[in-house]
């Protein structure tokens, strides 16, 4: 798609889903900008598109360049910009002043794309030109294929980043009830994403806390740790998944997230047990999802799945079939394509 210039932060999971995958679907080859002078690139641009903030460019410099070259700015946003105080990045967020920086970019943008209607309502107070384009996946392509590895176990899998300690606490009591329960003797509990960075010892501390929360301080039977995978192959975690567990703490930050975790599990035809709150409670077909709102319902779903492998297979297939149709990136991304075309004409 000529005229659209994405600004990509290559190691960002948010950029991967909000910029890189949609960019590839639109036929944009970002390598064509490599080695080019910034002014040369922007002078040929009609739309400049980025997630949250444009990397190393300051707002003053990009707004000056917009005035000089006449391109439109599109901000793609997938999270609320005010972190919950318990979020592990809250101090870094304050130091970098992101609670003010992101709203300033929202106000400056010619259009803002968000993942949910709830987040759109927050943005609309700052910029009326907001568009809801949910997360979607290129099902059937690259890593988004069902490549499940069969196992003798019923595998309950959690996959996530290093900021979910308090979300995982939702699982502590339900998982504790499985210990020494013969129903779960052939079950496995897998936490994916463990990522200790040598240069940042605090990362190992945080992940160790998460691990101890997930495996009930080492007491959970058949616990498996899977370390982090690169962005272009992280879906291989789900090759070891029969049922995805997706806990979320109910707070004012989490409700503005997207339902991406459901979409990822569905790529592998895995059913999901999720916290019954936004962004999951408004899933288009609630009958395809197992919702839990307390220890009792979490445990009931875990136990039912452990006892009923046929249900797990059939419900996972139904979720996968629905999601591959409803959240296919090539369909969802058409709105983004039309928006960019409209902006380039205006």
Image (cartoon, rainbow, N blue to C red):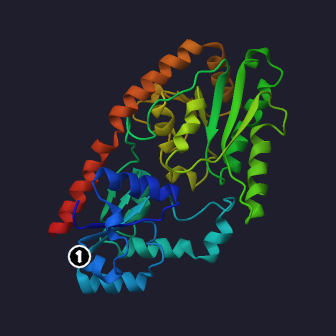
Which quadrant would the C terminus be assigned to in this image? bottom left
Residue 139 sits in which quadrant?
top left
Q: Which residue occupies 73% across, 34% down?
A: 224
Q: How many marks?
A: 1
Left/right of residue 335 with respect to residue 238 in the rendered view: left
Residue 142 sits in which quadrant?
top left
Q: Residue furthest front?
A: 35
Pick whichever, 301 or 199, lies toward us.
199
Q: Is residue 132 visible?
A: no
Q: Is residue 115 visible?
A: yes
Q: Which residue occupies 73% across, 30% down?
A: 174
Which quadrant would the N terminus be assigned to in this image? bottom left
Left/right of residue 225 with respect to residue 133 in the rendered view: right
Residue 222 sits in which quadrant?
top right
- Residue 81 percent across, percent down from the top left: 52, 65
Q: Which residue is mark 1?
A: 44
- Residue 157 percent across, percent down from the top left: 63, 33
- Residue 31 percent across, percent down from the top left: 36, 64
Q: Secondary structure at mark 1?
A: loop
Q: For label 1, count other residues whose C-alpha is less than 10 Å away and answer few (under 14), some (14-19) or many (20+).
A: some
Give the vertical position of 15 relative to 33 (above or below): above
Give the vertical position of 236 relative to 343 (above or below): above
Give the vertical position of 330 relative to 68 (above or below): above
- Residue 264 percent across, percent down from the top left: 49, 39
Give the vertical position of 6 relative to 338 (above or below): below
């Amino acid at each position: 798609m000529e005229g659209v210039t994405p600004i990509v932060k290559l190691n960002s999971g948010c950029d991967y889903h909000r910029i890189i995958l949609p960019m590839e679907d639109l036929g944009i080859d970002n390598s064509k900008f490599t080695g080019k002078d910034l002014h040369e690139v922007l002078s040929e641009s009609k739309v400049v598109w980025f997630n949250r903030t444009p990397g190393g460019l300051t707002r003053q410099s990009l707004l000056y360049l917009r005035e000089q070259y006449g391109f439109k700015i599109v901000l793609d946003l997938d999270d609320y910009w005010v972190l919950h105080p318990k979020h592990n990045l809250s101090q870094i967020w304050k130091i970098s002043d992101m609670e003010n920086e992101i709203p300033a970019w929202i106000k400056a943008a010619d259009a803002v794309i968000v993942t949910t209607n709830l987040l759109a309502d927050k943005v609309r107070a700052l910029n009326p030109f907001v568009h809801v384009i949910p997360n979607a996946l290129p099902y059937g392509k690259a890593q988004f294929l069902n490549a499940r590895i069969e196992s003798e176990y019923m595998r309950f899998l959690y996959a996530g980043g290093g900021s979910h300690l308090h979300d995982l606490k939702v699982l502590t009591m339900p998982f504790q009830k499985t210990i020494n329960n013969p129903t779960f003797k052939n079950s496995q509990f897998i936490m994916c994403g463990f990522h200790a960075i040598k240069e940042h010892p605090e990362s190992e501390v945080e992940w160790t806390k998460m691990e101890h929360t997930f495996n009930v301080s080492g007491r959970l039977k058949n616990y498996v740790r899977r370390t982090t995978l690169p962005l272009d192959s992280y879906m291989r975690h789900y090759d070891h998944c029969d049922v995805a567990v997706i806990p979320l703490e109910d707070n004012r930050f989490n409700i503005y997230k997207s339902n991406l975790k459901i979409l990822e599990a569905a790529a592998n035809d895995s059913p999901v047990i999720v916290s019954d709150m936004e962004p999951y409670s408004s899933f288009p077909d609630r009958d395809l999802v197992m919702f839990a709102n307390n220890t009792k319902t979490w445990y009931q779903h875990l136990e039912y799945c452990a006892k009923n492998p046929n249900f797990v297979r059939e419900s996972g297939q139904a979720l996968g079939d629905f999601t591959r149709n409803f959240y296919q990136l090539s369909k969802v991304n058409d709105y983004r394509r039309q928006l960019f075309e409209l902006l380039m004409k205006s």
